């Protein structure tokens, strides 16, 4: 029975939403896939309503109460939808030709590709606890606090939490205390049905959400184009995007869910305007409004949708409706701008890199602008469609220009820009597939000779560009110098617990510390030896450090981080690697699970062949998850190397130009689609290979760890152990606690806060004032290390004996009755 609880928790809201939407299916012109896709997100909204009602009537917060509440709301919405049917005009039924054998085979292949992506994501969800920073700091923290409180409660801002007069009230504080409730409601519902909070189960609703996204996009693409193959193609393109895959595998952020409301809502709005379909227009506006239950970013996309309606239907709308539409759009924009500070940020180079160089999108941002430009040409059969899609895309990008170029949001463009666009990615894929289908004619193609010549010429041109880059960036020396090899016997450990073995230097497993290893005095020209190959075992892809000194500045060591595991490292891209080098060394950091061994360090000239080997190694070497993965995907560890995404996108554009030049203005679409699909699949094959290696690394860690709830970074298992010790010492009644630390430990402090639930914790960076001390029951000081561990409680509790002393930190009670060991 327990094995069935998770599927039940995942499917019940889906069934509820689908049942509630069923009366409107025909009037909204939804296919079976579209109905199921949109129905899931309606079910998620119904769960949010249940959470709101349970916060008012706590007797609903039980498993039976939630089931009754969800059933009642489903019946109410179903009755309302049934009555609404009469107000929506009937639409012509969608008539499709029967599928051909080729279409069935291609659909099966695309389904297999989608299953592969979802399978890797499900594997990560099975093993990994809540991983991304803001997920466990805000979204999952809120849901976990609800679960231990017995019902949903508001998260409080810090000042209000500190000034709370009634200590018996369940109150918690988080940084995003103003965030909407939809995402926490999904995790809270799962935990309530399961009967326990399980970190690697409460994020599973992201998987059916991703499936629903694919289904909704599938249905809308088929309905808009009238082609069977458009649906699986659109869904496969969406689910194969690395950034979307990451938001499924590392579930916990709200952007994936907002894609199910704002992204699918914009699709329905665009389709409603193009087909003059009132049902689709109502569906799109309703989805866009419900997006406000997910994240405040939804106000941007709601404003874009309203502005598009005003642009395309302004002349047809009655003056009152037009004024209302403009007022709502401006009101939405004004509300959004009122929550941010104006600040000019004219540099958009980082934004461009995220679209065209990073690996988050494959070649979507090469294909979509190209398809729009092609569709806007005179005599194009998709010109009207392209104008609508182009207008909405322009509004989307204009909103980004204002947000990141004229407000303080420009300071976090790297962390937020890609996630913001992810929220409307279903529309971007929908627009691309619709434009392709509008140009596609299944007529026999006869110009194979010219087409092969065009593709071959563009491919050779791409290879020529790569060759020119290789030769221009290689070492200028005509005859390369022999490499400088430093074996373990020639290297010296000047700091740290390093063992000198016959063939290697070894650093024992540890959670902290470092070792400094140096070549001693050397003398060579940096321009001659600008390629480093450090043979290090046991570090995985840990970040280690290289340091060096120059004759021009012998007292100042220069340091750069190295991501090991990706092959040789280019040093010439560092501006400080120049002149005469007098010393080279490594700063090694221990691995908590394996010894780190240095066998050899080699410095050699950067030849064209070596540069090519480095590029291939960087393209093929897997890049494992980091906290930055949820924001952007960058698979290459060498910033000086060309992105494979850039090369693939450039090759596709060169092929298109060559096809246009050789075949004229009537260049056939089929060969270009073949090239574009080949480039997409090439990038996707690399991403799937990366996903496989990541899955194996995840299983290797969590299958043998003693603390599966801990993250596989930042010594999180020690922080989790401290939290469990504190929970054992304190009684079951939730306590109010302040957590602070020696030095900079923001990550560890916030992980401690999450793991201490149901105790309510407030994190402070700095000393604790007497006023704040009086507002809590206990204070925890995290130590930076054993040597820094304070023996007694710190001010203002210097005279109090610690309640708990561990190598990771100490617990001191603020109440006089708790002054004992």
Image (cartoon, helix red, strand yellow):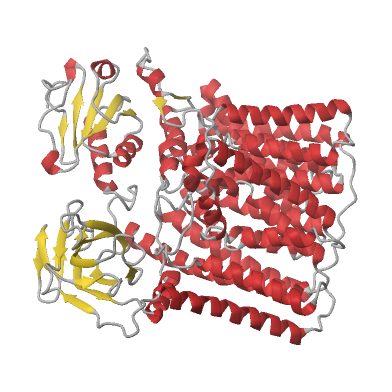
**Residue extending furthest top?**
165
Camera-nearest residue between 424 and 653: 653
**Position of residue 556 in the picture relative to residue 82 (left or right):** left
Q: Could you say where residue 198 lies in the image, as x and y percent from the top left?
A: 41, 44
Percent coordinates x, y for residue 716 in the rendering: 29, 47
| Quadrant of the image occupied by residue 40 | top right
Residue that sits furthest to the front in the current view: 552
Q: Quadrant of residue 525?
A: bottom left
Vertically, is 530 above or below 297? below
| Residue at the image position 79 percent from the left and 83 percent from the top | 447
Q: Identify the residue shown where x is 48% and y is 57%.
A: 633
- Would residue 197 be visible to someone looking at this image? no
Q: Which quadrant of the figure contains the C terminus?
A: top left
Residue 456's image quarter?
Answer: bottom right
The answer to which of 731 and 813 lies nearer the viewer is 813
Indicate whether 374 appears above or below 481. Answer: above
């Amino acid at each position: 029975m327990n094995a069935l609880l998770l599927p039940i928790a995942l499917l019940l809201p889906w069934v509820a939403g689908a049942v509630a939407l069923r009366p409107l299916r025909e009037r909204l012109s939804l296919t079976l896939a579209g109905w199921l896709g949109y129905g899931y997100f309606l079910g998620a909204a119904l769960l949010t309503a249940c959470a709101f009602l349970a916060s008012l009537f706590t007797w609903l917060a039980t498993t039976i109460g939630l089931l009754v509440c969800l059933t009642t709301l489903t019946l109410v919405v179903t009755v309302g939808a049934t009555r609404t049917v009469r107000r929506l005009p009937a639409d012509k039924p969608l008539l499709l030709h029967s599928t051909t054998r080729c279409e069935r085979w291609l659909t099966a292949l695309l389904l297999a590709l989608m299953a592969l992506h979802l399978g890797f994501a499900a594997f990560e969800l099975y093993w990994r606890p809540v991983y991304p920073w803001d997920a466990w700091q805000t979204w999952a923290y809120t849901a976990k606090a609800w679960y231990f409180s017995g019902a949903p409660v508001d998260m409080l801002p810090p000042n209000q939490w500190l000034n709370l007069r009634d200590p018996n009230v369940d109150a918690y504080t988080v940084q995003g205390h103003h965030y909407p409730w939809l995402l926490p409601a999904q995790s809270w519902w799962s935990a309530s049905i399961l009967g326990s909070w399980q970190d690697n189960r409460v994020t599973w609703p992201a998987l059916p959400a991703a499936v629903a996204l694919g289904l909704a996009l599938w249905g809308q693409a088929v309905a808009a184009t009238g082609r069977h193959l458009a649906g699986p193609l659109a869904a496969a393109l969406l689910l194969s995007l690395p950034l979307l895959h990451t938001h499924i595998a590392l579930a916990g952020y709200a952007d994936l869910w907002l894609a199910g409301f704002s992204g699918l809502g914009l699709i329905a709005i665009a389709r409603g305007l193009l087909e003059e379909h009132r049902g689709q227009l109502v569906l799109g506006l309703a989805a866009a409004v419900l997006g406000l239950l997910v994240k405040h970013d939804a106000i941007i996309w709601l404003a874009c949708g309203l502005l598009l309606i005003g642009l395309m239907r302004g002349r047809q709308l009655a003056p009152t409706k037009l004024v209302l539409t403009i007022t709502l759009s401006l009101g939405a924009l004004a509300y959004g701008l009122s929550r941010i500070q104006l600040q000019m940020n004219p540099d958009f180079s980082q934004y461009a890199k995220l679209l065209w160089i990073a690996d988050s999108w494959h070649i979507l941002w090469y294909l979509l602008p190209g398809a729009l430009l092609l569709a806007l040409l005179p005599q194009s059969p998709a010109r009207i469609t392209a104008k609508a899609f182009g207008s909405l895309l322009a509004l989307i990008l204009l909103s980004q220009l204002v947000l990141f170029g004229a407000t303080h949001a420009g300071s976090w463009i790297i962390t937020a820009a890609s996630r913001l666009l992810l929220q409307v990615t279903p529309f971007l894929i929908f627009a691309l597939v619709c434009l392709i289908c509008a140009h596609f004619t299944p007529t026999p193609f006869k110009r194979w000779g010219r087409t092969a010549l065009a593709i071959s010429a563009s491919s050779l041109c791409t290879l020529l560009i790569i060759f020119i880059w290789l030769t221009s960036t290689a070492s200028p020396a005509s005859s390369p110098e022999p490499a400088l090899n430093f074996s373990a016997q020639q290297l010296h450990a000047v700091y740290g617990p390093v063992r000198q073995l016959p063939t290697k230097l070894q650093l024992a497993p540890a959670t902290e510390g470092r070792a400094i290893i140096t070549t001693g005095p050397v003398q060579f020209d940096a321009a001659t030896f600008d390629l480093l190959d450090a043979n290090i075992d046991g570090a995985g892809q840990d970040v280690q450090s290289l340091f060096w000194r120059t004759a021009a500045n012998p007292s100042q060591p220069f340091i750069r981080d190295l991501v090991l595991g990706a092959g040789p490292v280019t040093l010439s891209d560092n501006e400080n690697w120049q002149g005469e080098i007098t010393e080279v060394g490594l700063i090694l950091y221990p691995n908590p699970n394996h010894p780190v061994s240095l066998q050899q360090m080699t410095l050699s000239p950067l030849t064209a062949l070596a540069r090519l080997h480095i590029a291939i190694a960087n393209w093929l070497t897997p890049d494992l998850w980091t906290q930055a993965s949820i924001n952007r995907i960058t698979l290459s560890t060498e910033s000086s190397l060309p992105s494979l995404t850039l090369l693939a996108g450039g090759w596709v554009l060169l092929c298109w130009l060559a096809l246009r030049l050789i075949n004229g203005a009537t260049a056939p679409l089929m060969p270009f689609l073949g090239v574009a699909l080949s480039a997409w699949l090439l990038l996707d094959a690399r991403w799937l290979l990366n996903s496989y290696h990541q899955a194996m690394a995840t299983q290797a860690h969590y299958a043998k760890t003693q603390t599966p709830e801990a993250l596989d970074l930042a010594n999180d298992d020690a922080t989790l152990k401290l939290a469990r010790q504190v929970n054992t010492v304190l009684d079951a009644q939730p306590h109010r606690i302040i957590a602070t630390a020696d030095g900079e430990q923001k990550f560890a402090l916030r992980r401690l806060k999450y793991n201490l639930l149901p105790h309510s914790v407030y994190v402070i960076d700095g000393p604790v004032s007497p006023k704040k001390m009086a507002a809590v029951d206990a204070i925890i000081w995290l130590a930076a290390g054993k040597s820094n561990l304070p023996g007694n409680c710190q001010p203002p509790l210097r005279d109090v004996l610690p309640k708990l002393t561990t190598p990771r930190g100490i617990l001191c009670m603020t109440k006089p009755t708790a002054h004992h060991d």
